[in-house]
Amino acid sequence: MQTHLTRRGLLLGIPFALSASALSAGLFSQTIPDDLDLALRRSTDASLYTVEIAPVDPSVRLGKMHAWTLGLTDKRGRPVESARIAISGGMPQHGHGLPTAPAVTQTLGEGRFLIEGMKFNMRGWWEIDLTIDGPSGTDAITFNFIL
Amino acid sequence: MRRTLHALPVVAVGAIVLAIGATDPVAWNEEELAVVRSLSLDELPPLPADPSNRVADDPRAVRLGKAFFFDTRFSSNGQVACATCHQPDRQFQDDRALSLGVGRTNRRAMPIAGMAYSPFLFWDGRKDSLWAQALGPLESAVEHGGDRTQYAHVVSAHHAEAYTEVFGPLPRLDTLPPHAGPVSDPIAAAAWGSMDGADQLAVNDVFANIGKAIAAYERTILPPETRFDAWIASAAFPKPGLLTEDEIAGLRLFIGEAGCINCHNGPLLTDNHFHNTGVPAVAGLPDDRGRVAGSAQVLDDPFNCLGPYSDANPVDCTELRFMAPAGEEMLRAFKTPSLRGVASRSPYMHAGQIETLDQVIVHYSAAQRAPEGLSELRPLNLDETQRRYLGAFLASLDPIQ
Ligand SMILES: [Cu+2]
């Protein structure tokens, strides 16, 4: 839940002039920064792992519970068979977290894992934060996803 | 988080550009059109299955549940039925800030149409199915005011045949106390405590089945078509026709600058989630913590999807299994209501705090601080014309007469 509070804190920290502008940004802005990295296969922050995530059903629908697969490889590209993976996230422009608490429910083998319980209850820019605690150590990555 | 900080100035500039750039009131881009269509009743998917209720789609259960819904014998004073507060000719609500059953409730009655699509029920989501929900008011001292053995006796005396057809034979009830249940009434509670475990379980089964039949009926209550839906389906769409220019300008605000669509989305105009929107507390009512309390209660509820009275395979209880834990964010967060029919069912909010739609829009424009927790809203500072447009749009969500 730490990340949710941080997001909220950030929003509240927007300078007064900004939040009081005729049409306030933040919650009500539909404008998504155009330089977002939308790649769903990326290397973790400290480059310990490469993570690839994909929705099981590629047409992710608003408000529907759905599952994702996660592929995990180490620095040398070898599949990581066992890791503790924590999932959180939220909407940075709205200051709230995920509406559900997704979790890895299955190890599919060859470095692949099943994440269940994902839901997006709004359109817009979502961050998916993963923390990976595996054989090479603990590392994190934030994916961007636009619904 | 650094990424977020970088992003904010970009967002701000974007918003200002949007604000300055005059928009043609008629032209919509493809993305906007798609968003508008996503609000249409035509986009409502088929009813989601309820694996926790094996009779959810059994027409005999629908008939039985409908009879239960209107039967005032399911109450301590013989005068209260579900329909007392959920009146079919009033969008299944009662036009009151707080409802009157055997006593007075601390929240406003919610309309029922389309709620089979909602994973969590009540303003705080303390129930995870329509059938588990129905059991709440039956045992509430201020709503129906009765108890479990009383209701089992009512079923046996007045609905035995229809019940048996749907659920199989009733258990033997003649040796059981007339009033017993885990309720606040001390006599009924004591009688329940002295019943043996097997009898309690048998009565609990009947009680849960009452809920399952009512839920089967409630699944058939869907929102009627509105002028807004008819406009989207019309040849004029997206030009004015069944909707006026003002109403369309309101729609544009709703899905754009005013950001209403963030929470009021999809064909039912709700994201089925919980938000603190800074709605004031009501003096004299108990402190209401909203979803923070509701998420704990639904996990503890013996009638939830994972409990012994559920017909679901536990793996199918995805909403409960992956329910977000009650964090700070959920303090005084309440369920986003559907906005279908909203203009003709004041008062508004979870305890009827706001009298008129105009005042609701002022509430969103000002975005005052929450009495507790943090409001997700930011001031919109809408001018009078914008407020009028939004109000006009909301009125287009009324059923076609
Ligand atoms: Cu959001």
Image (cartoon, rainbow, N blue to C red):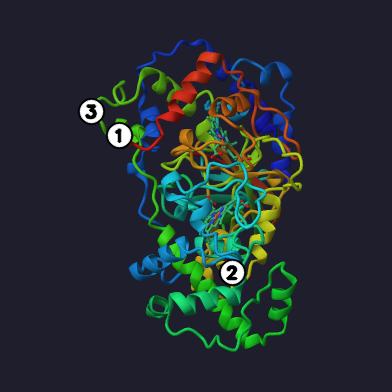
Residue under label 3: B235
Q: Chain of mark 3?
A: B
| Residue that lies at the very extreme toward the left in this rendered image | B235
Please provide percent x and percent y for residue B276: 66, 39
Secondary element type, mark 1? helix
What residue type is disc 1 on? Ala
10 Å crowding of disc 1: few (<14), some (14-19), many (20+)? some
Please provide percent x and percent y for residue B368: 70, 28
CB within 8 Å, label 2 to label 3: no
Number of numbered markers: 3
Q: Chain of mark 1?
A: B
Is residue A19 visible to the viewer in this orientation of the structure? Answer: yes
In this view, the mark in front (2 or 3): 2
Is residue A32 visible to the viewer in this orientation of the structure? Answer: no
Secondary element type, mark 2? loop
Residue under label 2: B303
What residue type is disc 2 on? Phe
Secondary element type, mark 3? loop
Query: Which of the two residues, B65 or B121, is positioned nearer the viewer here?
Result: B65
In this view, the mark in front (1 or 3): 1
Q: Is residue B140 left or right of residue B211?
A: right
Q: Are marks 2 and 3 on the same chain?
A: yes
Of marks 2 and 3, which one's residue comes earlier in the chain? Answer: 3
